């Protein structure tokens, strides 16, 4: 279901900045070529921009990709800086995703 990522088996964050003008095809290419991961799995991939106040989420929903975009009015996302890395977040510790984001930042992704 669109905007419900609680069923995602894995969550990966793309460390470093990503050009958020990129669409689905280019983000899929980054996941495949740079991170050597399969984007066609039940996995949520998170990317953030240079200003750290915007985030894109890429998610495969059985037969199509969902691409979500969120911009914060104030504050910034906390994000690892290494440019060529994707980190897997531990699903058994759901607060790991929230720790990267300001309070309630994922709320619109869940509702």
Image: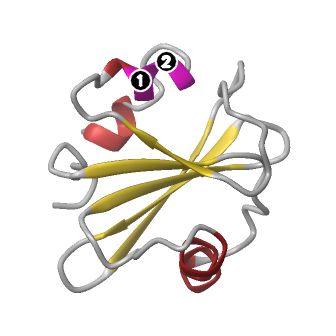
For image coordinates 67% across by 53% down, the residue present is 85
On the image, which quarter does residue 41 sit in?
A: bottom left
Question: Is the Cβ of the residue at disc 1 closer than 8 Å to that at disc 2?
Answer: yes
How many angstroms separate mark 1 from mark 2 (CA)? Answer: 5 Å
Q: Residues within 10 Å of mark 2 (few under 14, many from 20)?
A: few
Q: Residues within 10 Å of mark 1 (few under 14, many from 20)?
A: few
Q: Is residue 99 left or right of residue 80?
A: left
Q: Is residue 100 magenta?
A: yes
Q: Which residue is mark 2?
A: 99
The dominant secondary structure in magenta is helix
For image coordinates 60% across by 74% down, the residue present is 27
Q: Is residue 25 left or right of residue 42?
A: right
Question: What are the residue bounds of the magenta stretch?
Answer: 96-101
Q: Is residue 49 above or below residue 30?
A: above
Q: Is residue 99 magenta?
A: yes
Q: Could you tell me which quadrant the N terminus lies in?
A: bottom left
On the image, which quarter does residue 77 sit in?
A: top right
For image coordinates 61% across by 46% down, the residue present is 55
Q: Is residue 61 left or right of residue 54?
A: left
25 or 42: nearer the viewer: 42
Residue 63 in picture, x, y percent from top left: 21, 86
Q: Could you tell me which quadrant the C terminus lies in?
A: top left
For image coordinates 41% across by 23% down, the residue present is 96
Q: Which residue is mark 1?
A: 96
**Disc 2, SS:** helix
Residue 68 in picture, x, y percent from top left: 47, 58
Residue 31 in picture, x, y percent from top left: 55, 71
Q: How is the image coloured?
A: secondary structure
């Amino acid at each position: 279901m669109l905007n419900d990522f609680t069923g995602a088996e894995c969550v990966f964050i793309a460390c470093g900045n990503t050009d958020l003008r990129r669409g689905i095809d280019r983000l899929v290419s980054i996941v495949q070529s740079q991170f050597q991961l399969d984007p066609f799995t039940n996995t949520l991939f998170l990317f953030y921009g240079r200003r750290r106040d915007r985030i894109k989420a890429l998610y495969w929903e059985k037969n199509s990709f969902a691409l979500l975009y969120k911009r914060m009015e104030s504050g910034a996302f906390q994000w690892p800086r290494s440019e060529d890395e994707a980190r897997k977040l531990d699903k058994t510790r759901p607060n790991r995703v929230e720790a990267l984001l300001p309070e309630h930042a994922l709320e619109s992704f869940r509702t």
